[in-house]
Image: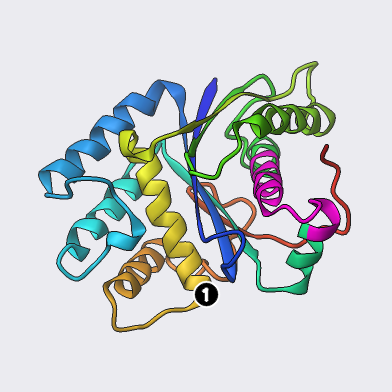
Amino acid sequence: MRIHILADESGVPESSDSLAYGSLWVPGKFREQAERGLDQLATTSGLLGELKWRKICWSNIDRYEALLGWFFASKHVAFRCLVADTSSSDYRRFIQKFNTGSYQLGFYKLYYFFLTRNIKLDLESLKWTMPEDTFKVWLDQKPWADPRRIPTLISVCNSYLKKRCTANSGHPQVISVSEVNSKRYRLLQLADVLAGATRAANVGFSKDTAKFQFVKALESKLGRPVLTSGTRVRERKFNVWQFRWPASVQYP
């Protein structure tokens, strides 16, 4: 089976107190169906243009909450999120010691952790994927992104997966990572919305806003306030991982 991972992040590596890497995971054979369904909902409800966390306001809150209804009703679409506290001295040490002071390199290393650990989790704990499955990753394009880092990201992800996830002579593989314009992909836009909500819950924001109402609606769907505490390992539909800074990093 081929899995598509459509990922976006909320927060700025150089200046935010927190980063949230969020992605929608969907089997390839259901990808187009999911894109069409989400686009139809957005269009018919009047959400023209790109879906964005920052666009949520009182005039459209009901329509954005309808997106949550679509997501939780879509059995083939799952959400994974890594939340990293970037206000700590551990983050600054991570950047200086393991990334030669480069926030951009640190940005891609966090994607390495995010992708490999979630693929390993899906394979070993959730039993959603098989050792021979392949993964196509779609990242929202950033103006400062360096495409030369993509081959390294693919290489180190597959090196980890081969070492840690081999079973029956096979192991999952990341076959591509593409940086694309999110305006073309509704699923990527929804990843932005859910990542933004998760990050906002962790950094705090005003309770008299439409975004706060959206977060409360999301937590109501989940049944408990897990955006700040993280979810159980076996949570398949909506999984939040509170990242802990490593003592060492093996990454070229």
Q: Is residue 93 left or right of residue 113?
A: right
Query: Which color scheme is applied?
Result: rainbow
**Residue at left offset 34%, top offset 35%:** 185
Work out which residue is located at the far top of the displayed protein and give it. 169
Q: Is residue 218 left or right of residue 232?
A: left
Compared to 85, does 81 lie above or below? above
Q: Give the range drawn in magenta.
A: 96-116
Q: Does the magenta stretch include residue 106?
A: yes
Which image quarter is the C terminus in? top right
In the depicted view, which residue is nearer to us: 127 or 109?
109
Please identify the dominant SS of the magenta region: helix
Compared to 251, does 147 lie above or below? above
Which three-letter amino acid code belongs to the residue tagged 1? Val
Residue with the mark numbered 1: 203
Q: Position of residue 87 (x, y in %)?
A: 66, 73
Q: Does the magenta stretch include residue 111?
A: yes
Q: In this view, does 58 lie to the left or right of 136?
A: left
Query: Exactly how many numbered labels are in the figure?
Result: 1
Q: Splitting the image into 4 quarters, where does residue 111 fall? A: top right
In the depicted view, which residue is nearer to us: 142 or 168?
142
**Residue at left offset 79%, top offset 51%:** 99
Q: Where is residue 27 in the image (x, y as percent from the top left)?
A: 47, 27
Q: Where is residue 249 in the image (x, y as percent from the top left)?
A: 84, 49
In the depicted view, which residue is nearer to us: 79 or 250?
250
Q: Splitting the image into 4 quarters, where does residue 54 fall? A: bottom left
**Residue at left offset 74%, top offset 23%:** 171
Q: Position of residue 232 (x, y in %)?
A: 61, 59
State the SS at label 1.
helix
Q: Splitting the image into 4 quarters, where does residue 32 fall? A: top left
